[in-house]
Image (cartoon, rainbow, N blue to C red):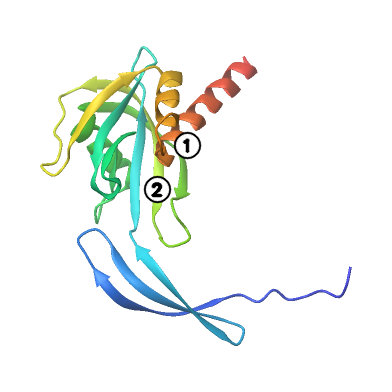
Amino acid sequence: MSGSRVRQEPEVLRDELIYRGRRVTLVKRLVRFGDRVLEREVVRFGEAAAALPILPDGRVVLVRQFRAPIKGWILEIPAGVVEPGEEPEETVRRELVEEVGYEAGFVEEMLRIHTTPGYSDEVLHIFLAKDLRYVGARPEAYEILEPVVMGVEEALEEVLKAPVADSKTVLALLTYLSRRRLRGARG
């Protein structure tokens, strides 16, 4: 092994506003790395929260939702943007009622991920929701969706057979199934 090398760290110089919308902001981020200054377009999104709702009988509640960016329907777990002053757990509880009509007696964060770190700062908190009580769905006026109930393995099959799968839903289902198998292996 040759002599020790000090790793050089990039330095964020500044962000220059390109566009500010209702949900996202686009900036040009200038980063110094050595003697170079690099420009990167960054979508500032902030945080979102999603939940895998598990009914008492073990089935899951998903949402079949029309998504304008992909010009079609997709099967996904309920999710939404963390509003200012709101904690991710509050967001997920709100979204569960709005999108599928259930209040959760128990929520637990399974993981948090960067959804697309190549161009966005979004952090997504993925929760498990249990002890569900039906109270009636209250979707936002701009949402086109319908709740869908099915077994966990069936849900994973349905999501994966789509031309392009929803990543948060795949990850939530696989994480849940993995945790369930680990608990079973431990007895």
Distance, label 1 to label 2, CA atoms, is 11 Å
Q: Which residue lies furthest to the left in this view?
A: 141
Per the image, label 1 sits on a secondary structure element best described as helix
Where residue 126 appears, as percent x and y from the top left, is 41, 40
Q: Quadrant of residue 27?
A: bottom left
Q: Quadrant of the C terminus?
A: top right
Q: Of the residues shown, which amino acid type is indicated by label 1? A: Leu
Of the residues under marks 1 and 2, which one precedes in the sequence?
2
Q: In this view, does 98 lie above or below 105?
A: below
Residue depicted at x 39% and y 15%? 58
Q: Name the residue under label 1.
A: 171
Residue 102 relative to residue 121: left or right:
left
Residue depicted at x 19% and y 60%? 22
Q: Mark 2 points at which residue?
A: 124
Per the image, label 2 sits on a secondary structure element best described as strand
Q: Nearer the viewer, residue 139 or 183?
A: 139
Q: In which quarter of the image is residue 89?
A: top left
Q: Which of 67 and 9 is in front in this view?
A: 67
Q: In which quarter of the image is residue 34?
A: bottom right
Where residue 10 appears, as percent x and y from the top left, is 57, 76
Q: In which quarter of the image is the N terminus?
A: bottom right
Q: Is residue 143 above or below residue 18?
A: above
